[in-house]
Image (cartoon, rainbow, N blue to C red):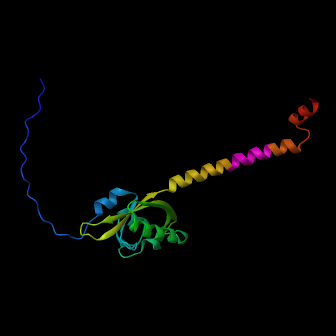
Amino acid sequence: MLSSPPPVPERELPVRQVKAAPVALGPLLEAAGDIVFALDPAGVIRQASKRALALTATGGELHGVGLATLMADADQPVLRNAIADAAGATDAVRIEARLKTPEKEIWFEFRLAALALPDGAPALLAVGRDMSAQRATEERLRHMARRHWLRQWSMRLRRLLNPFSRESATVRAG
């Protein structure tokens, strides 16, 4: 016969009072997405993930830099609006923007969400997901669709314009 173990008496666990120290979001920044930034409400970077530092090649320091300045010029206004929207929203704001790197611009999907730090200071978390593989696949599919469409139209035009084709001859004979 199976039985459950006897209940363990609960005991009071000592509660330590911890003063609000500067928040180290390091593990969260590394686990949350491809690139992650902790921002102040104005969009200035407080902390960045290691991959974000590596991609931007800024010598390991992004603290105090505006996140929008790291984006492609055309995407900067979109990001600034998203930061303003996320600062006052309860839900995450999603945008797609290109991060400038020394080699090229890389598409990322960013989700920005308001965050209250343990010390009570308001902050934003910007989690980026690399969209370059998806964008490349979409572009390949568009290219294939264009080629297919062009091939279909060229075959139709040939049939229409060539009066000596087999199909047009059978139509005239019938």
Q: Residue 98 vs residue 142: left or right?
A: left
- Which of 49 and 92 lies nearest the eye of the viewer? 92
Q: Position of residue 154 (x, y in %)?
A: 79, 46
Identify the residue at horizontal 36%, vertical 76% (top origin).
64
Give the quadrant of the N terminus. top left
| Placement of 63 over or under 12, stated as above or below | below
Q: Residue 61 vs residue 134: left or right?
A: left
Identify the residue at horizontal 70%, vertical 45% (top origin).
148
Considering every residue shown, the one lying at the far top of the view is: 1
Q: Position of residue 97 (x, y in %)?
A: 50, 64
Q: Residue 49 vs residue 134: left or right?
A: left
- Magenta stretch encompasses residue 69: no
| Placement of 147 over or under 35, stated as above or below | above
Q: Residue 8 vs residue 35: left or right?
A: left
Identify the residue at horizontal 53%, vertical 72% (top origin).
73
Identify the magenta region: 146-155
Give the quadrant of the C terminus. top right
Considering every residue shown, the one lying at the far right of the view is: 173
Identify the residue at horizontal 58%, vertical 51% (top origin).
138
- Which of 33 and 102 lies nearest the eye of the viewer? 33
Q: Quadrant of residue 49?
A: bottom left
